[in-house]
Image (cartoon, rainbow, N blue to C red):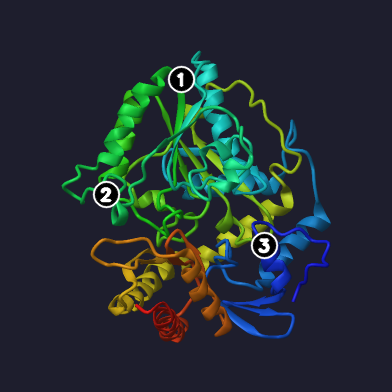
């Protein structure tokens, strides 16, 4: 265990957690990881931040990285190009939803979001709309924590509030969280008010000042929440009316997580700009990307932007091999099939008094908890964390998000893996409910 005398600073980890001891993961193999004492854990959130789509320990990707380092480890993304970046951009132009056709590479999802916002700003600038700088996000959204991106952060609030004042221009709409509707309405009688209210926000803020609307196809902030089918087409119609670009954030959803190569395929809309990361390399090396349509790119004479490690040849080589594995092993299809099977298993837990809703899109699933199924009363996060701890003690790594437990396993998961886990989760929930007196 890592103790508090370490020199390492951990992200989003309290001093109390460090004093209690932090698990050190030393090896990954398939769907499992091992700590420094040799204890095996089934990794049901793909490295917890969900990037490891092809599973742990893929020697093919390691070899691709090694070969590229030996050939060309680095060269600038400015006024020079490299072959892996050119090749990966071509692959992404083929597999991303229409009309995405131009790609730029960054280090991670936060940088991809930042770059997407810069692309939107550049587009409007070169169109003569130099006053457009505001970005509409949603309450409950997560779009990374870099400079421009943090202004769109609608969840994990201390991550934004501690850093305030942030870049101006962040606007927040309500999210399509039907289980706990922010308006107190019920779908479909609500007439999708959360989407239609977007027009009121635009009118209030000034249409000529708004650059883009950014949203995740499936939101992580509430735990893998898929919106009603009408939501995104309404958003698209309103944004088109006011000349506002749509940035679809596929950092988590992309590369098979939701049972499609990209979750945008579920939405029946065409994005102007698309962000990617995580499953792009399955986390083996850092890489993010922002893609845009020809319509967005063509007016931009020169992108006033530079990151040292942009278009990195080694990361792009890993991305090429990773996508090859996803396609060759039909992992997108497996995500859809195993996602349905996993969801059926989670639905068997709805017998518990604390289980309010089970949901999932492909292999991104959640169990939303409540202390009262009739009123959908909030569930204490401390008790949710107790369930996470109980599962870890029994050899399973899971996480909580909002008032839900979230599951995003590697896309190689099998029915046998799922059958092994569901009874354990059942036991963990029952133990916590007994401790709470539910």
In depth, the one of 87 and 157 nearer the eye is 157
Gap between marks 3 and 1 measured at Cα:
39 Å
Disc 2 is placed on an element classified as: loop
Residue 223: name its quadrant: bottom left
Disc 1 is placed on an element classified as: helix
User: Is mark 2 in CB contact (under 8 Å) with mark 1?
Assistant: no
Residue 237: percent from the left, percent from the top? 29, 32
Residue 347: percent from the left, percent from the top? 31, 75
Query: Which residue corresponds to mark 3?
Result: 284
Label 3 Cα crowd, 10 Å radius (few <14 / some 14-19 / many 20+): many
Give the residue displayed 52% in from the left and 24% down from the top.
133
Query: Which residue corresponds to mark 2?
Result: 229
Give the mark nearer the N terminus: 3 vs 1. Answer: 1
Q: Is residue 59 left or right of residue 428?
A: right
Query: Which residue corresponds to mark 1?
Result: 209
In depth, the one of 206 and 324 nearer the eye is 206
Q: Is residue 394 left or right of residue 23?
A: left
Residue 20: percent from the left, percent from the top? 70, 73
Residue most extreme to the front: 437
Q: Is residue 145 left or right of residue 236?
A: right
Give the residue displayed 55% in from the left and 49% down from the top.
91
Q: Which mark is residue 44?
A: none
Gap between marks 2 and 1 measured at Cα:
29 Å
Q: Is residue 329 visible?
A: no
């Amino acid at each position: 265990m890592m103790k508090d005398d370490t020199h390492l600073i951990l992200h989003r980890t309290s001093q109390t957690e460090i004093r209690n001891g932090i698990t050190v993961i030393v090896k990954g193999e398939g769907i499992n990881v091992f700590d420094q004492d040799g204890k095996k854990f089934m990794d049901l959130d793909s490295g917890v931040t969900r990037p490891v789509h092809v599973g742990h320990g893929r020697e093919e990707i390691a070899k691709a990285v090694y070969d590229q380092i030996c050939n060309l480890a680095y060269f600038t993304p400015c006024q020079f190009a490299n072959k892996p970046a050119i090749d990966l951009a071509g692959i992404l132009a083929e597999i991303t939803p229409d009309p995405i056709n131009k790609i730029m590479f960054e280090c991670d999802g936060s940088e991809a979001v930042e770059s997407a916002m810069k692309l939107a700003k550049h587009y409007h600038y070169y169109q003569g709309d130099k006053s457009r700088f505001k970005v509409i996000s949603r309450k409950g959204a997560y779009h990374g924590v870099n400079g421009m991106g943090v202004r769109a952060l609608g969840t994990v609030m201390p991550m934004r509030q501690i850093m305030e004042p942030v870049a101006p221009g962040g606007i927040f709409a309500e999210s399509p969280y039907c289980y706990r509707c922010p308006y107190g309405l019920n779908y479909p009688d609500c007439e999708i008010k959360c989407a239609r209210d977007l027009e009121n926000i635009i009118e209030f803020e000034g249409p000529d000042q708004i650059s883009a609307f950014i949203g995740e196809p499936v939101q992580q902030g509430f735990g893998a929440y898929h919106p009603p089918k009408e939501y995104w087409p309404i958003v698209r119609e309103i944004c088109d009316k006011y000349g506002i670009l749509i940035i679809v954030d596929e950092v988590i959803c992309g590369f098979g997580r939701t049972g499609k190569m990209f979750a945008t395929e579920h939405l029946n809309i065409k994005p102007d700009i698309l962000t990617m990361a995580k499953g792009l390399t399955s986390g083996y090396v850092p890489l993010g990307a922002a893609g845009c349509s020809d319509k967005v790119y063509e007016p931009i004479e020169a992108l006033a932007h530079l990151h040292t490690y942009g278009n990195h040849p080694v990361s792009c080589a890993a991305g090429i091999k990773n996508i090859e594995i996803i396609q060759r092993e039909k992992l997108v299809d497996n995500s859809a099939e195993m996602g349905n099977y996993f969801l059926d298993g989670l639905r068997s837990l709805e017998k518990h008094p604390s289980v309010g809703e089970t949901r999932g899109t492909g292999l991104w699933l959640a169990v939303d908890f409540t202390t009262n199924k009739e009123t959908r009363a909030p569930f204490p996060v401390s008790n949710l964390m107790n369930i996470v701890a109980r599962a870890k003690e029994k050899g399973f790594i899971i996480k909580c998000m909002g008032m839900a437990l979230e599951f995003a396993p590697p896309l190689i998961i099998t029915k046998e893996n799922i059958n092994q886990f569901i009874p354990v989760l059942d036991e963990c929930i029952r133990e916590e409910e007994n401790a709470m007196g539910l």
